[in-house]
Image (cartoon, grey):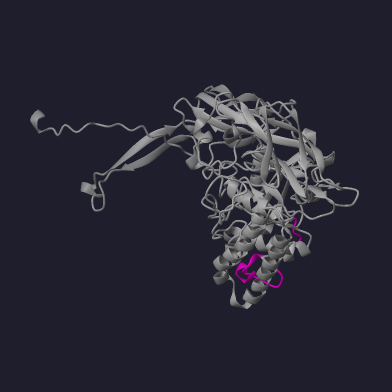
Amino acid sequence: MKASLSGLALEYRIVQLYSRDAGKREAMLSFNVGQGTQDIGFRSEVPILFNCLPAVNVTLEVLDFDGKPTTAGFIIRDEWNRVYPSRGRRLAPDFFFHNQIYRHSGESVLLPPGNYTVEYTRGPEYKVKTQAVTVPNAETHQETFHLERWIHIAAEGWRSGDHHVHAAGCSHYESPTEGVTPEDMMRHILGEDLNVGCVLSWGPCWYFQKQFFNGKVHELSTDDYVMRYDVEVSGFPSSHAGHLSLLGLTEDDYNGVERIEEWPSWDLPVLQWAKEQGAVTGFSHSGWGLKVDGDNLPNYNMPPFDGIGANEYIVDVVHDAVDFISTVDTPAVWELNIWYHTLNCGFRTRISGETDFPCIYGERVGLGRIYVKMPPGALDFDAWVAGLKDGRSYVGDGKSHLLDFTVGGVPVGEKTPTGELSQLDLEAPSTVTITARVAARLNETPNLEIKNRALDQQPYWDVERARIAESQKVPVELIVNGQAVETQEIVADGEVVPVQFETSIDRSSWVALRIFPSSHTNPVFVIVDGKPIRASRKSARWCLEAVEVCWNQKVDRIREAERDAAREAYNVASQTYQKILEESDVD
């Protein structure tokens, strides 16, 4: 007998079985080696009897930095590094594509008795803490978790927001119910300490999710945390020209249409329709289609304009139809480059920060953020989105902050006595003082895996990428007309420190601060002797050429009935950039 044994190794597999209810259960295990072998002598199935033991109801007491109950995110792992609850068995509000779950103080999670390591936090302004937990063999158990902030931006008057998140779509929860409910999304907004969450309905989930749109903030909103349903024009006929984020709509159905297939096939009419009802308009995931070779800013290479980012922006900005373009969720150079060029031509579009959860980033909402300076008191969405439009803000990953940015005493986003926003008027060339309060936080040990990645690899914006060599310092750059003209280094230890620059402004210019690629202010516009900003002939020439590149990419997908109007709008853009080029006298 021994000589006839095959010698094949014997393998064991440990199978962890779950049941909705505790008690005795039976499972049937079936064995086969492929098609046609499933019924080998009717001996391929083995019934397994098992007793499903009850889990322990573990209540989580979650206390904020000030001792008040709050909501936080928890990653729970056992001794074998398995995540609980099992991702494959999760239902909303716990998402199967997350390691973390979100719980408010007093809520619970079911866990088998055993030893666990719990990692918990509440967005990028909080430290990530770890706590060992032993769950006894009992019906109930309670654990207390104390959160710790490293910075409190809302207390400074800056309210965070992510203007682009979804409750359905992409690869995660489109079917069978076409997404999740407002209650689920609000939990995630609270768990990431996101003051404003804009939940945008779009093509694949449009007819289900649009039921939650009512033209105002959702009833689950509070004085400090606001959620509003609005629209991303994605999966619509104009999507090829660039997806649009439309915020603060009063009506979400385009004039006179019943189906999304009937919407316009290019962006400008949609933007104009939204602005007619007072909405704030912008382009989503701006970098797609705007890939350029090289990491320089401004970058004078020509992108293909073949994607769904801020492509038609090059035309629509001329028609005063765009309030902002989005940043943080696509490669920073691709996003910022087109913005820098149009700023150099004298246009005043602002930037906002977004995540495009769960499509570009599925890890959590608020990975890309905008911080808007707000007056004290309850958070008002209309005032917040007006601050986004006015550029009273900065954007980033939430791991670095550029607070109270001023140029010549003019705060970003504030109205001047003449009624202009973010504008410093000079009678003649002079030296101006730039100030801000800046903070960033890095671990002492570099994360080289992130730091050394190419800029077109995720995470696109992360303070780790700004680290100077292997120090704990990051550079704060003064940007004038797209060029970094001065740099100061700060220690990224979480402390807020003042920075000050003195720079000479010899012609009308735009000025900003950045920690690249982690955070970026909106600009202050310095007008010398009343002349418009004409910062660069090269930028004007780039924009002029870009109009035709964009047209050649988009024209075949614009309906024939709309093509003449589109061509005329593109012609106006070309004529405008040609005039700006002629008015510019600096390369």
Magenta highlight on residue 207: no
Q: Is residue 523 visible?
A: no
Task: Give the residue at x 81% y 39%.
Answer: 432
In the displayed structure image, the side of residue 260 where residue 497 appears, left or right = right
Instruction: Choose between 248 and 337: the one closer to the eye.
Output: 337
Instruction: Choose between 583 and 60: the one closer to the eye.
Output: 583
Q: Position of residue 566 (x, y in %)?
A: 65, 71
Dominant SS of magenta comes to loop
Task: Give the residue at x 83% y 40%.
Answer: 408
Part of the protein shown in magenta:
248-267
Task: Give the residue at x 27% y 32%.
Answer: 11
In the displayed structure image, the side of residue 582 where residue 94 appears, left or right = left
Toward the right, the furthest residue is 417
Q: Is residue 102 visible?
A: yes
Say which quarter of the image contains residue 580: bottom right
Task: Give the residue at x 64% y 70%.
Answer: 264
Q: Position of residue 569 (x, y in %)?
A: 68, 70
- Residue 40 vertical position relative to residue 494 in the rendered view, above or below: below
